[in-house]
Every structure is written in structure tokens, then in C-alpha cells.
Amino acid sequence: MLIQACCISVPMRAIGAFAIVLLAAACVGPTTSRSGVVHDIRIAEGPEPADLIVNPGDEVRWVNARTLPLRIDLVNVKLDELSCERRFSNIFGAIQESATIEPNGTASACFVKAGVVNYNLRMDSALPGGKVIVPGIIRIGGKP
């Protein structure tokens, strides 16, 4: 059976295969099991607070208070260390280590394992080179 639309024939099998791929992609990624506590890191000239202590399962939300977009790079974070995320995955649900946040936008992640997460903020700057990299740290489960 073929579907014809505007002179293009598409076999039903191709449409079915595409639907299966989309459904499978939606199943990839962290499950949601947050504690309900949200910690904001406000970013203007740098992260505030730059050193944050949270509990496992808490949500960490980065808020871009700048007039330009910025990028957050998480250092060595794996899929099994997240129970939720927003903006740290691609269209197929695969976790990425960086997220771009537009002005007044946010990105977030929930970390399930105790430990330390380092991150870098990559921001446009008037300084020579045009970019500045500012580090930050999140301590999950207190100070290790």
C-alpha cells in the first residue's frame, strides 16, 4: 500500500519503521525520580553560587540572567548519574555533556549519586579572545 501526497509515494513500511524509531528514541534517557527540591544557579557575570551543595535527587537549575546565550559543559557526567535533565539531551533523548541556554532561559539536571560535579560556563565577553570560561562545582550529598 502506498500513500501519495503531492506526487511523492511513501511505502507504509517506511512510515511504520520511522514511527518505531521515534518511539524507541523516546524511551532513551534518564527516568524521573526527583526529590522535589530545586536549587537555582543564577548566571550573570558568573555562577551564583559557584559552589553548591545539594542532596541526591535534587534538581539543579541554571538560569541565564545575561543578555547573550551561554553554554554549560558538564565534566564527566554519565547517563546513570542523572534522574532528570532538561536541555542536556539531543532530539533522540541521548544525554549530551553540554547545553546552550538562551537569555532568560534555563537548563536543569538531577544528580542521583553522591559526589562532585564540575561544570564550565562558556560565555561571550568583551575581553580579548571574545570568550570567557568560568568554572563551577556541585557537591551532591554534602562535602566529600
Image (cartoon, grey):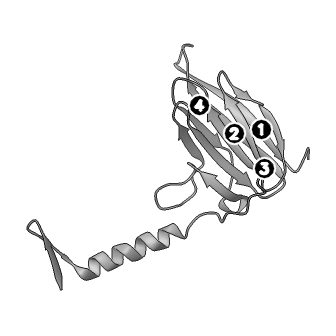
Residue that badge 4 annotates: 122
Inter-mark Cα distance, 3 to 1: 18 Å
Residue sitting at 67 percent across and 50 percent down? 109
* Secondary element at image label 2: strand
Relative to the observer, which residue lies in front, 118 or 46? 46
Q: Earlier in the sequence, mark 1 or mark 4?
A: 4
Image location of residue 38, percent across then percent down: 74, 46
Q: Nearer the viewer, mark 2 or mark 3?
A: 3
For residue 127, the mark is none
> Which amino acid lies under the numbered mark 3 shown in the image of this protein?
Val
Q: Are marks 1 and 2 in contact (CB under 8 Å)?
A: yes
For residue 37, the mark is 3
> Which amino acid lies under the numbered mark 2 shown in the image of this protein?
Tyr
Q: Are marks 4 and 3 in contact (CB under 8 Å)?
A: no
Residue that badge 1 annotates: 137
Residue that badge 2 annotates: 119
Q: Nearer the viewer, mark 4 or mark 3?
A: 3
Inter-mark Cα distance, 1 to 2: 6 Å
Q: Are marks 3 and 1 in contact (CB under 8 Å)?
A: no
> Which amino acid lies under the numbered mark 1 shown in the image of this protein?
Ile
Relative to 45, does residue 70 appear above or below in the rendering?
below
Residue lying at the far bottom in this picture: please name it: 1
Inter-mark Cα distance, 4 to 3: 26 Å
* Secondary element at image label 3: loop
Q: Taking 13 as reference, is 87 left or right?
A: right
* Secondary element at image label 1: strand
> Which amino acid lies under the numbered mark 4 shown in the image of this protein?
Arg
Image location of residue 72, percent across then percent down: 61, 38
